[in-house]
Image (cartoon, helix red, strand yellow):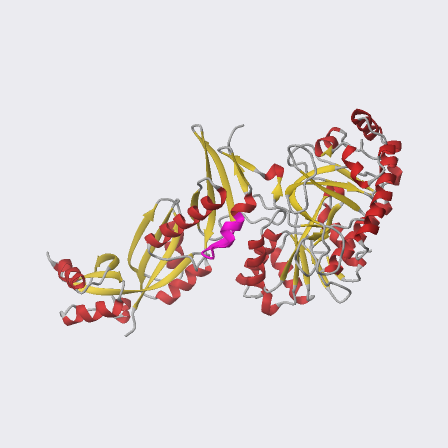
């Protein structure tokens, strides 16, 4: 399946797109109404490009139909629920049939295999177990490939490290910021991840992270750091990079992806940045048609060096709702992270504080000074501060105030890191 | 020649930080001989000469401070007008730059002690010695 010729994959996608379109139309009053508003019926889908005739679905639709208004099957088909945290609004509920869990598991099993994991591995799952999809998702995928799962979930960092040593974890799945914290705590305990553990791969996601963070993780701990992608609405974590670390493989027999211009809604070419739109082709409790997750990325359809033919997304650049607008300029926290990770004098944890002074937006970046960056000459520290400001300005095109803080001052997170504090009253 | 090791700390400019530093040293039985705080807005650098630099460095580091050790010169000054001039003019004539300096008066002797970080510690030592300025050793600092 993973090396199926592109033409055959497209034919398969078309069959499945027709089927899912017909299915939602027949089973969901929500979709029937949406299709009617857009003046389309399932009969209008004759080729893959016809997908552009179908209306988009958005997060707000899930909220408005809370809890189960977008389900296409009676609830007794559902074998599992996951619920989003609802930090940015009402929570969203996702239901899974037995088959939906199977699709999810298969997707992750392919992904974990593509990074070279198998039955000899011990995979430590440091994502939260529970309503959040991360823990259970990875758990099922890892079991499917015959690996041993160490379900540590989040928290209790010292115990995570002890178990990593004692049970010889070879891979860990968690947020990249939590792994950086684990590495710090290990160092304090006198344990080198590189020398004293068997860890060789990390599967990091659930928050955007930069290539520079990857390099820092790989350089300091000696593991290979892989990007994982997915969101709860389309199941949970689903896709990763393969060993070539050159884009996240999206299984085209399960999900059809488009990249659109967020303003016009028109599809953009491969290689152009845009908003990711996903249609689920093999999910039945709550299928999604043209769902706008809000993540910005770039699509690549050429086969990967590894031989897999499915399209890749080239790294999540940020989510449209993570974007800060400061003095009218768009700023993504990931851009700031890229700059900071290239400066060895400061640590990997940072915080962005946006406030308004009078009519002006002010951005302050707080970052921890490392031992390496410390000089007891004030002039050197001021010069470092200026250098960081200048590099931020080069990348962001707006000026940012930099505050050097003591190590350990920026709050560490076990789940998704909260990096932006915006005190502006909108 | 072994140099005097000064402990330098990076601290944020907020209440209680200095208290934490001095408590950490006092709990470890480390005595501060001389200290200075240089402040630069959000943060500051504390520099100090203590009786047991290695121990002071370790306890501060283990308490999570960003800390480093720097070689400094401690020279005796006459505690009379012109005492400082004698030293800094000698260094100036030899084109040696002083990054920073701070002074303290010792209880037992009548001398004042000047702690300096200079850009060329060897040259400074030669220049001052040739003019008869007494340079303190780590042992002497420890014994004060």
Compare residues B37 and A258 and report the one nearer the observer. Answer: A258
The quadrant of the rendering that contains the N terminus of chain A is bottom right
Number of numbered markers: 0
x then y, percent, for residue A89: 66, 32
Q: Is residue A82 visible?
A: no
Q: Is residue A348 magenta?
A: yes
Pick the quarter of the image with the C terminus of chain A: top right
Instruction: Determine the residue positioned at 35% across, 44% down.
Output: B41
Q: Is residue A24 left or right of residue B112?
A: right
Residue A65 picture location, percent across and down:
77, 29
Residue B119 drawn above or below residue A383: below
- Residue farthest to the bottom, as pictured: B1
- Name the quadrant containing residue A235: top right
Relative to B114, A127 lies left or right: right
- Report if residue A360 lies within the magenta region: no
Tell me if I can see residue A394 in this picture: yes
As rendered, which of A281 and B136 lies closer to the eye?
A: A281
Vertical relation: A285 (above or below) A340: above
- Of residue A168 and residue A350, the one placed in the foreground of this image is A350
Across and down, in percent, residue B16 comes to 40, 47
Given residues A12 and A405, the one toward you in this image is A12
* Residue A377 figure quarter: bottom left
Q: Which residues are magenta?
A: A337-349
Q: Give the farthest residue toward the left.
A: B81
Residue A29 in percent (x, y) is at 84, 28
On the rendered structure, is A225 left or right of A352?
Answer: right
- Residue A256, quarter of the rendered image: top right
x 59%, y 69%: residue: A195
């Amino acid at each position: 399946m993973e090396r199926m010729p592109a033409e055959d994959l497209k034919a398969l996608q078309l069959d499945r797109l027709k089927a899912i379109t017909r299915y939602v139309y027949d089973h969901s009053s929500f979709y029937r109404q949406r299709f009617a508003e857009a003046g389309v019926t399932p009969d209008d889908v004759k080729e893959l490009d016809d997908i552009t005739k179908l209306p988009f679905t958005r997060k707000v639709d899930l909220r408005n139909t809370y809890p189960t208004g977008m389900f296409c099957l009676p609830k007794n088909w559902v074998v599992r629920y996951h619920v989003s945290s609802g930090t940015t609004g009402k929570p969203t509920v996702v239901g899974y049939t037995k088959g939906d869990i199977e699709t999810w598991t298969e997707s992750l099993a392919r992904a974990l295999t593509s990074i070279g994991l198998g039955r000899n591995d011990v995979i430590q799952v440091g994502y939260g177990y529970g309503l959040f999809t991360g823990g259970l998702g990875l758990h099922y995928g890892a079991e499917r490939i015959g690996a041993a799962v160490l379900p540590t979930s989040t928290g209790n960092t010292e115990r995570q490290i002890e178990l990593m040593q004692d049970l010889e974890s070879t891979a860990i799945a968690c947020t990249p910021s939590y792994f950086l914290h684990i590495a710090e705590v290990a160092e304090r305990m006198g344990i080198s991840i590189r020398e004293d553990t068997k860890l060789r791969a990390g599967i990091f996601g659930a928050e955007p992270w930069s290539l520079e963070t990857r390099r820092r993780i790989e350089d300091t701990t000696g593991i290979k750091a892989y990007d994982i992608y997915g969101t709860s609405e389309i199941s949970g974590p689903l896709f990763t990079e393969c060993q070539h670390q050159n884009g996240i493989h999206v299984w085209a027999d399960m999900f059809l992806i488009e990249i659109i211009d967020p303003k016009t809604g028109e599809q953009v070419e491969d290689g152009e940045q845009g908003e990711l739109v996903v249609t689920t082709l093999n999910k039945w409790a709550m299928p999604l048609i043209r769902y706008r997750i809000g993540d910005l990325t770039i699509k690549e359809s050429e086969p990967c060096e590894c031989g897999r033919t499915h399209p890749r997304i080239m790294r999540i650049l940020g989510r449209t709702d993570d974007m800060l607008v400061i003095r009218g300029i768009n700023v993504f926290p990931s851009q700031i992270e890229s700059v900071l990770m290239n400066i060895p004098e400061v640590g990997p944890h940072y915080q962005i504080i946006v406030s308004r002074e009078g009519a002006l937006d002010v951005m302050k970046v707080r970052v921890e000074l490392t031992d390496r960056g410390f000089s007891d000459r004030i002039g050197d520290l001021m010069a470092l501060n200026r250098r960081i400001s200048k590099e931020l300005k080069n990348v962001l095109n707006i000026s940012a105030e930099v505050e050097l803080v003591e190590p350990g001052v920026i709050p560490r997170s076990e789940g998704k890191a909260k990096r932006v504090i915006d005190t502006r009253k909108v | 020649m072994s140099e005097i090791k000064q402990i330098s700390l990076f601290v944020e400019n907020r209440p209680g930080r200095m208290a934490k530093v001095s408590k950490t040293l006092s709990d470890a039985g480390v005595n501060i001989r001389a200290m200075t705080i240089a402040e630069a807005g959000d943060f500051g650098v504390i520099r100090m000469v203590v009786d047991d630099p290695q121990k002071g460095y370790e306890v501060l580091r283990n308490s999570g401070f960003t800390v480093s050790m720097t070689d400094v010169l401690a020279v005796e000054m006459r505690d009379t007008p012109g005492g400082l001039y004698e030293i800094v003019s000698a260094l100036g004539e030899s084109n040696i730059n002083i990054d920073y300096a701070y002074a303290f008066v010792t209880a037992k002797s009548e001398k004042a002690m000047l702690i300096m970080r200079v850009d060329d510690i060897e040259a400074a030592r030669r220049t001052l010695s040739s003019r008869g300025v007494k340079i303190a050793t780590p042992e002497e600092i420890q014994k004060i």
